[in-house]
Amino acid sequence: MNEEVTIRQAIQSDCAKLSEVIEAVIKAIPYYNDLAKESEIKKFQPSDLELKIIDDKHSVIIATIKDEIVGFCLSRFDDNLIWLEWFGVLEVYRGTGISNLLLTELDKTVLIRGCHKIWCDCRTSNKASIHILTTHGYKQIVTIPNHWYKQDFILWEKPFNS
């Protein structure tokens, strides 16, 4: 990639545009059914993102190019663990290493947030996520058939030494 990527914590003024980027990424995902897409998009409206940032400034990480949001990593403090809710990159920027940069930045928040593990899920058919999660050191915990939104998922974990 010829353009410089900046990875940073989101601020409240980013939330309207970030919500649009999240919606674009989720709508383009072929692994989710319509019910899942609709439900997930509703979770990340600008006001919801603003509350996430107020609650935990480390929970919303964005990737920008020329001040335009091109990717995101959303997480949540979850009983001394970090739940990786979503990470995504606009289609035109996929395959450029931005997801790796976002996950690396998320790793830096683990000890700051008093956690010892990140965990997440992905669809069993999502080969791109399976690849990046495996490459980034996540281990499969279990596969759950017919689960969220009546779809099959893999649960993942990445432990850290505290």
Image (cartoon, rainbow, N blue to C red):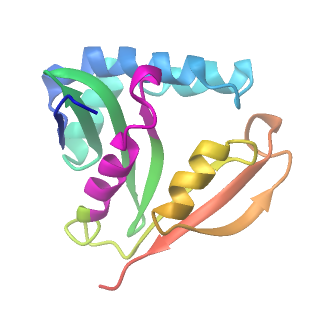
Pick the quarter of the image with the N terminus: top left
Horizontal side of 54 relative to 52 (left or right) equals left
Horizontal side of 34 relative to 58 (left or right) equals right
Q: Residue furthest front?
A: 2
* 16 versus 135 height, above or below: above
Q: Main secondary structure of the magenta part?
A: helix
Q: Quadrant of residue 38?
A: top right
Is residue 65 located in the magenta-colored stretch of the structure? no
Horizontal side of 103 relative to 24 (left or right) equals left
> Whole-percent x and y of residue 35?
71, 21
Q: Residue furthest right?
A: 146
Q: What residue span does the magenta drawing correspond to?
A: 87-107
> Whole-percent x and y of residue 59?
29, 46
> Whole-percent x and y of residue 27?
57, 17
> Whole-percent x and y of residue 19?
36, 19
Q: Residue at x 25, y 35 (%)?
A: 63
Q: Quadrant of residue 109?
A: bottom left
